[in-house]
């Protein structure tokens, strides 16, 4: 069993949320439930409330995205387990009683999440609450349509941001639902397994193997292949995401503008992540695609899975503005409000003065 730095397997989800709230004064736990809410709930009066959630183990998703300009609250389940219906309903009641002008549930496309959030939605509506649900399925791994639809991946975080900026600006529930209905597309390529606390690895890869399109719970991907150099791995991912014969492909033509998310699935080093990010920008530029914004980091993980996912969202000026909008959510990065490019001009090397020993740029 892989080592985990936890107090107990059974209590790790609760302990993680308690730690997040302890370190962030803008967050509160809902008594008796695994729910994190904004501390300033009174500020949402007259605005649409946004609730999301899912199983734990994907941190910082989703509780790290609670804050002004993003989510109003999050409902968490145990590791890789959908939240309880009663907890989702309690979260809806909390924001409704705070004066929200309707509530939008943002749910990843997994059967348990859809079922439990959906049941809570029906019960809340029976109590008179105005509640809608958007199901995010941004996975572009599978070439043929699946009965269950596309899985929800890191594109969900972009939906949180877009919806949160709209809600903060006072948009109506109908307007927000319309804007976020077209989800981003994502593709993941893990090169190592994951294991829940107290459990065994969910899959095994040989030392020289990687898997294209594996899910964030260890679900099977498209195919296994020999480990590729970063440039080739990124090209393989982008080619699959944009292949017209792929039923879930992203139509990406020269001149398109995108928001790129390079997401660490949990066990990748920062060094590797930087290499992948640079490769992604270069490969998109070679296709004539403008990377309007690039986000690089850990946004939706799968415990310690050694791998990376790429997310692309076609973005016009309005969407880019929503990505740039301010938020207090602790897990949202300080993104530069400028395009990514591999062609930034280098700073000229300083001239050596008389009698100066030659510098050795190779040390470090």
Image (tube, rainbow, N blue to C red):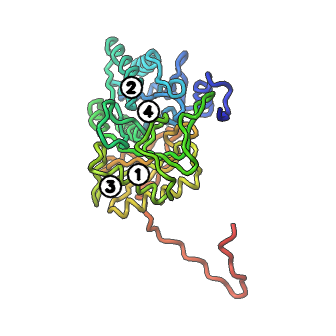
Task: Pick whichever of labels 1 and 4 is earlier in the sequence.
Answer: 4
Q: What is the CA distance from the residue labelled 3 to the residue labelled 1?
A: 18 Å
The quarter of the picture where the C terminus appears is bottom right
Q: What is the CA distance from the residue labelled 4 to the residue labelled 3?
A: 26 Å
Circles 4 and 3 in contact, beta carbons < 8 Å: no
Q: Which mark is residue 304?
A: none
Residue at 42%, 45% (x, y): give it. 223
Neighbours of disc 3 within 10 Å: few (<14), some (14-19), many (20+): many
Q: Which residue is mark 2?
A: 111
Circles 1 and 4 in contact, beta carbons < 8 Å: no
Q: Which residue is mark 1?
A: 237
Q: Which residue is mark 4?
A: 71
Q: Position of residue 122 (x, y in %)?
A: 33, 16
Q: Is residue 202 visible?
A: yes
Judging depth in this view, the residue of 159 and 254 nearest the camera is: 254
Q: Is residue 98 visible?
A: no
Disc 2 is placed on an element classified as: helix
How many numbered marks appear? 4
Disc 1 is placed on an element classified as: helix
Q: What is the CA distance from the residue labelled 2 to the residue labelled 4?
A: 22 Å
Judging depth in this view, the residue of 101 and 85 nearest the camera is: 85
Q: Position of residue 299 (x, y in %)?
A: 49, 42
Task: Pick whichever of labels 3 and 2 is earlier in the sequence.
Answer: 2
Question: Viewer-nearest of labels 3 and 1?
Answer: 1
Task: Pick whichever of labels 4 and 3 is earlier in the sequence.
Answer: 4
Q: What is the CA distance from the residue labelled 3 to the residue labelled 2?
A: 32 Å
């Amino acid at each position: 069993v892989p080592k985990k730095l936890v107090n107990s397997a059974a209590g790790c989800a609760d302990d993680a949320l308690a730690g997040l709230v302890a370190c962030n004064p803008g967050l509160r736990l809902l008594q008796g439930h695994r729910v994190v809410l904004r501390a300033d709930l009174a500020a949402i009066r007259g605005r649409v409330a946004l609730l999301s959630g899912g199983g734990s183990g994907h941190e910082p998703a989703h509780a790290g995205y609670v804050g002004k300009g993003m989510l109003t609250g999050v409902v968490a389940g145990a590791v890789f387990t959908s939240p309880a219906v009663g907890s989702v309903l309690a979260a809806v009641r909390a924001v409704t009683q705070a004066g929200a002008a309707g509530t939008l549930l943002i749910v990843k496309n997994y059967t348990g999440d859809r079922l439990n959030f959906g049941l809570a939605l029906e019960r809340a509506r029976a109590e008179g609450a105005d509640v809608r649900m958007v199901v995010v399925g941004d996975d572009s791994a599978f070439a043929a349509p699946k009965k269950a639809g596309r899985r929800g991946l890191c594109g969900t975080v972009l939906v949180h941001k877009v919806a949160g900026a709209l809600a903060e600006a006072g948009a109506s529930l109908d307007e927000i639902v319309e804007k976020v209905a077209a989800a981003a597309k994502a593709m993941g390529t893990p090169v190592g397994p994951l294991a829940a606390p107290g459990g065994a690895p969910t899959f095994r890869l040989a030392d020289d193997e990687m898997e294209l399109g594996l899910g964030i719970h260890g679900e099977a991907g498209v195919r296994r292949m020999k480990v590729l150099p970063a440039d080739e791995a990124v090209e393989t991912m982008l080619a699959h995401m944009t292949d017209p014969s792929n039923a879930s492909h992203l139509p990406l033509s020269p001149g398109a503008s995108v928001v790129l998310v390079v997401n660490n699935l949990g066990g990748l080093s920062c060094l590797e992540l930087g290499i992948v990010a640079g490769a992604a920008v270069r490969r998109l530029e070679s296709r004539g695609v403008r990377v309007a914004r690039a986000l690089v980091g850990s946004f939706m993980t799968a415990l310690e899975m050694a791998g990376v996912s790429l997310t692309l969202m076609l973005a016009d000026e309005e969407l880019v503005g929503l990505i740039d909008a301010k938020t207090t959510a602790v897990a949202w990065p300080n993104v530069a409000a400028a395009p990514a490019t591999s062609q930034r001009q280098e700073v000229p090397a300083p001239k050596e003065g008389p009698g100066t020993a030659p510098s050795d740029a190779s040390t470090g």
